[in-house]
Image (spheres, rainbow, N blue to C red):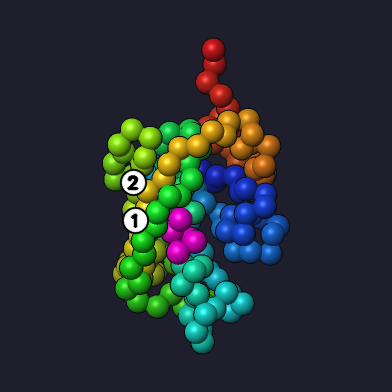
Amino acid sequence: MDGLLPGYKKCFFCGPATGGLGLELHYTDDGAICEFTAGDRFQGYDGMLHGGIVTGILDEVMWWTVFTRTKRMYATSRIEVEFKRPVECGKTYRASGSLLRNTGRIYYLSGVIEDERGKICARGTASFREFRFTLEELARHLDFRGVSPEIRALFEPPAS
């Protein structure tokens, strides 16, 4: 199953109307992915995307990957990013997350940002800890416009 994931209404990274990046993340069988082009207002050094924004994009695709795999809520407990080459403002990139392993309540993920030629610009690893937050609570804060019924079903509690 592939498809558009909802945005968290107040999220700087995936919220559709926050004035942030407005990332449109997609669910795939491998995890979450997104293509993005960031404007100059997100730069750090001249023409380069700020490293904190790069880190946040990686965190976003890794979080959505663990959520779509488990249908449970997690919070980032640790993230480490290696910056390989500049991510330039105004160019299109692809970010993706992958599940590495889990040890009970902690999940370990990796994420990459690649340029249009498939060259890795940044890669990250992160650990995520489960916390108590129900699917119903999460769904109240999501924007489901444009989301397919199959993807919407990911946010419904299992039938009793």
How busy is the neighbourhood of tag 2: few (under 14 within 10 Å), some, or many (20 plus)? many
Amino acid under disc 2: Tyr
Label 2: which secondary element: strand
Give the alpha-carbon distance from disc 1 to disc 2, as whole Å.
Answer: 7 Å
Part of the protein shown in magenta? 55-59
Residue at x 32%, y 73% (from the top left corner): 84
As drawn, the label of residue 46 is: none
Marks counted in the figure total 2
Q: Main secondary structure of the magenta part?
A: helix
Q: Is residue 49 left or right of residue 144?
A: left
Percent position (x, y) of residue 79? 39, 57
Name the residue that disc number 1 marks: 125
Rendered view: 29 above or below 120 = above
As drawn, the label of residue 108 is: 2
Rendered view: 151 above or below 48 = above
Percent position (x, y) of residue 38? 55, 71
Percent position (x, y) of residue 52? 49, 69
Residue at x 48%, y 41% (from the top left corner): 74
Q: Nearer the viewer, residue 129 or 42?
A: 129
Quadrant (top left, top right, bottom left, bottom right) of the N terminus:
top left
| Disc 1 + disc 2, Cβ < 8 Å | yes
How busy is the neighbourhood of tag 1: few (under 14 within 10 Å), some, or many (20 plus)? many
Amino acid under disc 1: Thr
